[in-house]
Image (tube, rainbow, N blue to C red):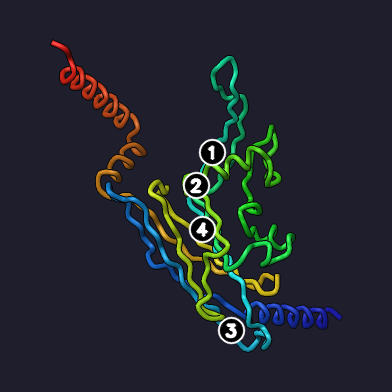
Amino acid sequence: MIARSVVAALILLSLGNASARAERLIVSVSNHRVTVTPNYSGEELVLFGSVEKDAATPADRNAYDLVVTVIGPRADMVTRRKERKFGIWINTDYRQFLQVPAYLALFANRPFEQIAPPEVARRQQLGLNNVLLTQRVGTDYADVVPNDPFRSAFVRLRTQRGLYREDPAAVTLLTPTLFRTSIPLPAEVPIGTYQVEIKLLANGVFLTKTETAFEIVKVGFEQFVATTARQNGFVYGLVTAAMALMSGWMASIVFRKD
């Protein structure tokens, strides 16, 4: 009986692997290393790829959906609520977001709600409303509903700066199995490693995914300043204070009245 159970398990496992191998994604980005120089004003990368089928692919499967998620370096961030009291605006409450992406973009070939049912969209984090953004709520750590005021404000503010974005028409299917999309990077894009996750679905069912990555680095004077601030904070602080004093002294000479 044990031998039969083992054989049955192996058969099921092989069938599962065959199903997983029914399609696979081959992808690449146009540039795996973006350099930030003094005159950097933004850049646009291009991701392109193909869906490869094998003998296990159902013969009637011809329509695919693709969702591309670009995740930048993670960091803790805070969203504050301001209220007007006694004629001035003051911070009255705040919410801390824990290790959330500094840059987040989601692209698809059609509206996310048409790609998969709600439960699949939540599980696969399809669309900004379904991306997990962990918050510190009192003593708890959890994500909240999409219309939570702090979450909505956080996403809105990041979107206004071009650091969070969602485009359900950004992925172009050149053929039933060839696709491309552009990845816009704003001028204030954070440096670090960016993970790109590509998910393949068909008829609302998740099939497979693959990943790639690119890096954003500073070069020249910007890199020197960033490295000094990170590795020699005390020296960086002294130099910054000295430069501020020098600038003030020079300004007092230039604009003084005789």
Residue at mark 1 to residue at mark 4: CA–CA distance? 18 Å
Q: Residues within 10 Å of mark 1 (few under 14, many from 20)?
A: some
**What amino acid is labelled 3 in the image?**
Lys
Q: Residue 156 in the image: state x and y as whole percent.
A: 56, 44
The tag earlier along the polypeptide, 2 or 3, is: 3
Point out the residue furthest to the front here: 87
Q: Residue 18 in the image: state x and y as whole percent.
A: 66, 82
Say which element carries label 1: strand
* Up-down relation of residue 239 to residue 178 (above or below): above
Residue at mark 2 to residue at mark 1: CA–CA distance? 9 Å
Residue drawn where x is 16% and y is 20% of the image = 254
- Mark 3 lies on residue: 53
Residue drawn where x is 63% and y is 50% of the image = 132
- Mark 2 lies on residue: 102
The tag earlier along the polypeptide, 3 or 1, is: 3
Q: If the image is split into quadrants, where does the C terminus sit?
A: top left
The tag earlier along the polypeptide, 2 or 4, is: 4
- Mark 4 lies on residue: 70
- Mark 1 lies on residue: 77
